[in-house]
């Protein structure tokens, strides 16, 4: 696997196998003088998206949802439609057509990981989160009736990286041990180290606990501490679904004032892309709803299909 033809590890490669799969490509003393003197700034586009377990989420549609979940019926209002079928092609099309170098996905169906990586022509590393036992049976039901299974299908945090960036190291770390989470979902931090020639950046992809701000705050602090230690001084991106709003939680000010991990999306947003050691070019911002909507024919009328209940968030950085 040594040399330029080496591929990044595929999704869900156990950490113990990574050393055999991927060489250590971090900056070393062997770099040529020309490489070391090249100080041309590079831009890094980062996209983060909670995929809602691969489901659609039409706005202002309340009638018929139970019928849709039980009988796989298509329901709609005047503007939007809800379909109860696999939406892999739709999600993959939006992701493959978007401009990004690194993509952080949460609530990603584990069965989609390899196919998404192929569609996006990206290397991948995934960390399974919660409810992934009896996966073959759950996957079959979720493929047939996604709305019936919902989050019970199981989930993952999936990090994708497009060339020239390559994943050379990866790890998955538990953020909420059993004594803290009790019966709540397990939350994990997916860590990756990426290189482009002699440049290096580390990425933490997370989805923190919902409905328990104090627990999510503890997880945010823990994730930042672990990610900074993993980065060892390299530029760091820590992004995903924090389930915390900056206007209600001071942890973001704490992280920005302390380790200089900054980059909240908006005061009332919960999806953020924090960065340390990178120069912001375009600060994190959510997509307009239309960018994740598709036009579909329902009966004789056209309506909009909106993917996920979260808007993708994107940011652009400059690094040397």
Image (cartoon, rainbow, N blue to C red):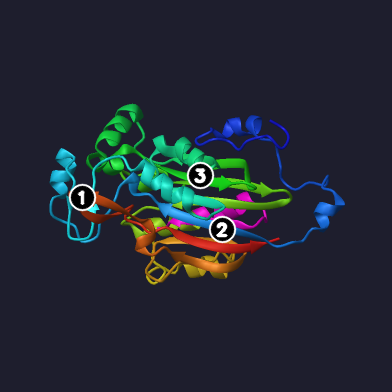
Name which of mark 2 and mark 3 comes first in the sequence. 2
Name which of mark 3 and mark 1 comes first in the sequence. 3
**Residue 233 sits in quarter:** bottom right
For the residues labelled 2 and 1, the Cα–Cα distance comes to: 36 Å
Whether residue 126 appears in this view of the structure is no
Residue 213, how many percent across, how many down?
36, 60
For the residues labelled 3 and 1, the Cα–Cα distance comes to: 29 Å
Helix, strand or loop at disc 3? helix
Helix, strand or loop at disc 2? strand
- Callout 1: 10 Å neighbours few (<14), some, many (20+)? some
Find disc 3 in the rendering and name its residue: 120
Q: Is residue 52 left or right of residue 300?
A: right
Residue 240, how many percent across, how many down?
45, 55
- Callout 3: 10 Å neighbours few (<14), some, many (20+)? many
User: In the picture, which quadrant includes the N terminus?
Assistant: top right
Of labels 3 and 1, the one closer to you: 1
The residue positioned 50% from the left and 35% from the top of the image is: 12
Magenta residues, start to end: 223-242
Find disc 1 in the rendering and name its residue: 298
Number of the label disc, if any, that sits on residue 45: 2
């Amino acid at each position: 696997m040594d040399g330029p033809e080496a591929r990044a590890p595929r999704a869900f490669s156990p950490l113990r196998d990574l050393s055999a799969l991927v060489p250590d490509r971090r900056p070393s003393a062997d770099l040529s003088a020309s490489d070391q003197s090249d100080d041309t700034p590079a831009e890094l586009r980062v996209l983060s998206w909670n995929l809602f377990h691969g489901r659609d989420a039409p706005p202002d549609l309340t009638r018929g949802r139970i019928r849709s979940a039980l009988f796989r019926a298509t329901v709609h209002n005047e503007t939007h439609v809800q379909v109860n079928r696999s939406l892999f092609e739709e999600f993959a099309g939006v992701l493959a057509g978007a401009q990004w170098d690194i993509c952080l996905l949460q609530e990603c169906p584990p069965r989609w990981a390899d196919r998404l990586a192929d569609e996006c022509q990206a290397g991948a590393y995934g960390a399974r989160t919660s409810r992934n036992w009896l996966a073959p049976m759950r996957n079959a039901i979720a493929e047939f009736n996604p709305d019936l299974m919902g989050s019970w299908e199981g989930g993952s945090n999936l990090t994708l990286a497009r060339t020239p960036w390559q994943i050379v190291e990866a790890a998955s770390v538990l953020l909420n041990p059993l004594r803290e989470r009790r019966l709540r979902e397990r939350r994990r931090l997916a860590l990756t180290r990426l290189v482009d020639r002699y440049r290096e950046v580390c990425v933490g992809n997370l989805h923190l606990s919902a409905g328990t701000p104090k627990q999510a705050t503890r997880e945010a602090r823990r994730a930042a501490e672990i990610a900074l230690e993993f980065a060892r001084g390299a530029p760091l991106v820590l992004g995903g679904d924090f389930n915390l709003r900056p206007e209600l939680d001071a942890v973001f000010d704490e992280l920005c004032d302390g380790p200089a991990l900054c980059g909240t999306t908006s005061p009332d947003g919960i999806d953020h892309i924090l960065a340390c050691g990178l120069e912001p070019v375009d600060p994190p911002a959510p997509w307009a709803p239309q960018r994740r909507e598709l036009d579909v024919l329902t009966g004789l009328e056209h309506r909009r299909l909106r993917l996920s209940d979260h808007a993708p968030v994107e940011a652009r950085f400059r690094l040397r």
